[in-house]
Amino acid sequence: MKKQHSPSAANIDAKATEYLAAQKEVARLRTELSDLVRAVGKTPHNAEKTMLLEGAGYDLRLSTRTETHVDTAGALALAKACPPKIFEQLFSRVDKFVVCRGAHKFVSLLPGKSGTIARERFYAALDTKEMGSQLKVTKRKQK
């Protein structure tokens, strides 16, 4: 096995510069593709945080990570104000409350004044923070 010679400082700097330029180009393309998916992509069935844009050979999926904190006092106020069957569709109790899957859709369909009050209190009990987006590009399967 041949001994590899150490690269010169100039070669190291050239490779580092090339690497940083490639990272900038990838970041630019990621932003461009993410903006495109946000502008014209569709939300797939049963996906609340993902958008999909289908190409001929590739699919672009943009998933947004969010972090939701539930205000315990707000959730308890809602628990007192609505029937248990409704509350159980919105929150479940672990060590603290977490939002149930499908709760946003469920609360949006509640009718009348009680539904309006439930929605107001439900959303008041949430503290949602966007945690950034993840773009995934996958090769489409041949049909």
Image: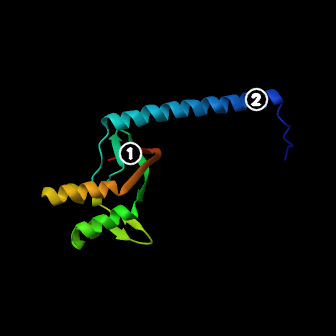
Of the numbered discs 1 and 2, the one sitting upstream in the chain is: 2
Q: Helix, strand or loop at disc 2?
A: helix
Which numbered mark, 1 or 2, is in the foreground of this view? 2
Identify the residue at horizontal 34%, vertical 44% (top origin).
52
Identify the residue at horizontal 58%, vertical 30% (top origin).
24
Q: Which amino acid does label 2 sit on?
A: Asp
The residue that label 1 is drawn on is 140
Q: What residue type is labelled 1?
A: Arg
- The answer to whether residue 141 of the structure is visible from this angle is yes
Q: How are the residues colored?
A: rainbow
Question: Which sits in the foreground, 132 or 79?
Answer: 79
Q: Is residue 11 left or right of residue 119?
A: right
Residue 120 screen position, x and y as percent:
26, 54
Residue 13: image tag = 2
Q: In this view, does 58 lie to the left or right of 19?
A: left
Question: Which sits in the foreground, 130 or 30?
Answer: 130
Q: Helix, strand or loop at disc 1?
A: loop
Identify the residue at horizontal 71%, vertical 31% (top origin).
15
